[in-house]
Amino acid sequence: MPSTDTSLRTVAEPSTLVAVRALMRRDLTLAYRHRSELLNPLLFFVIVVSLFPLGISPEAKTLQMVAPGVIWVAALLANLLSLDLLFRTDFEDGTLERFLLSPHPLPLLVLAKTAAHWIVVALPMIVFAPVLGQLLFLQPGAYWTLLATLALGTPVLSLIGGIGMGLTVGLRRGGVLLSLLILPLYVPVLIFGATAVDAAGAGLDVSGHLSFLGALLLLAITLAPLATSAALRVSLS
Amino acid sequence: MWIWFHKFGSPRYFYDLAGRLIPWLGGACAVLMAVGLYLGLFVAPSDYQQGESYRIIYIHVPSAWMSMFVYVVMASAGTVVLIWRVKLAEIIASVSAPLGASFTFLALATGSLWGKPMWGTWWVWDARLTSELILLFLYFGFMALEAAIEDKRTAARATAILSLVGVINIPIIHYSVYWWNTLHQGATVTKMDTPSIHLSMLIPLLLMAAAFQLYYATVLLMGARTELLSRERRTRWVAEVIRNS
């Protein structure tokens, strides 16, 4: 440190970019230290998918038909159940209030937290999805589309879920309420995601579906953090 | 303009104004509904394809319109809540939610009743039905969130955010569902250049739509008055109102 002056200033006002990066690193480190918890959404994803053959039929033809929808619905539910990780602990130990008081724009901090959440929760599911495709006899031509739709769609789920989490974080029993608020809003992502995989399995062009998912992602990135910030401010007021 | 805004937003003034408006709105609603039902059920000719059962549109279509209109009202009131913290807007949003949900439910129920003879099933996963169903879920979410938050003013701001998120999402949901599956007949009235519905059928429909609007306004004002008394029960003007009644 050259002098106390500059070091004080850098401590007091790090740039927003630094703050965002630090926040992401913090969240990822925290997640890494609780590795066993991280496994839960992934295990849920796998277990839910493996329930369907038991519930419907082990026949390859039937499973092949429902595979895109089942994998997508399971991914959606796993995402929903993991939303608690996004703000809950930070709310309980008071860290969330510090974020609200920080000089950096809250929407960017929210975006950073959501990105970390997506890396921790959704990325393993995307990596694992082809295996589940095998279990359900997914059409061979649909694998890349499955990965692409999940990669584009799950961030939207996390971003929309953040709004619901922000609204319910202060409530003691927010769990069921959260799903009631959020699941209807997940519908477009589910539709475009599952139908794209379906269409790819039938050998059709899916660029339209993917474009729509991309558009939804851009819209969610721009608007959802604003709504989440507003929701957090209401919840913590 | 701002004076008007504050005056209208003042609970006392609104309470009196609403009390004076309710009989007029309610009366006009009754007249329009009576005329509309008469014209629709007795005067309008029966449809050459659907026979008499098409007449359910005189309930079905206005409820479907209202289901969306009420959500927009809620979202607009929510905007006012978030920007200006007007208590009255909180009440309007809160009273509108169950009304909107009822209109949505009515639209779904009548649609299902009509679907049985026409399509042969009570329910099809048709685009408009599905998006109407999701709209019903959105209303339920709104009411559940409101019920979960103890403090009414916090609840109003939280639900306001939710309704704004919903209002951005409704068109997206609607069109995504639309591309997903479509069986429902196309819009017949909103094609402005040449409506594909005959005038003798259109007039009762529009009368019923107006009657539904007036019904909503009447019940909204009645509900808002009650809610206002309950939320302001510690103020002096409510004590006066109670004493004078």
Image (spheres, coloured by chain):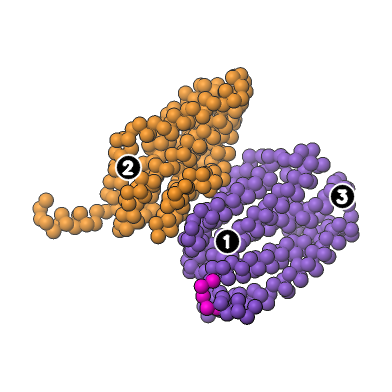
Chain colours: A orange, B purple
- Mark 2 secondary-structure assignment: helix
Q: Please give the label number shown on residue B94.
A: 1
| Residue linked to disc 2 | A27
Q: Residue at x 63, y 59 (%)?
A: B70
Label 1 sits on a secondary structure element that is helix
Residue at mark 3 to residue at mark 2: CA–CA distance: 63 Å
Question: B40 or A95, which lies in front?
Answer: A95
Dominant secondary structure of the magenta stretch?
loop
What residue do we see at 57% from left, 32% from top? A69
Is disc 1 surrounded by few (<14), some (14 to 19) or many (20+) residues within 10 Å? many
Q: Residue A137's mark?
A: none
Task: Say yes or no: labels 2 and 1 on the same chain.
Answer: no
Chain for numbered disc 3: B
Q: Is residue B90 above or below residue B16?
A: above
Instruction: Give the residue type that dot 2 points to.
Output: Asp
The residue type indicated by label 3 comes to Glu
B234 inside magenta stretch: yes
Mark 1 and mark 3: Cα distance apart in space: 38 Å
Q: Earlier in the sequence, mark 1 or mark 3?
A: 3
Q: Residues within 10 Å of mark 2 (few under 14, many from 20)?
A: many
Q: Please determine whether, in this image, residue B22 is positioned above or below residue A60.
A: below
Q: Residue at x 49, y 27 (%)?
A: A47
Q: Nearer the viewer, mark 2 or mark 1?
A: 1
The C terminus of chain A lies in which quarter of the figure? bottom left
Instruction: Write down the residue under mark 3.
Output: B52
Q: Position of residue A174 (x, y in %)?
A: 47, 47
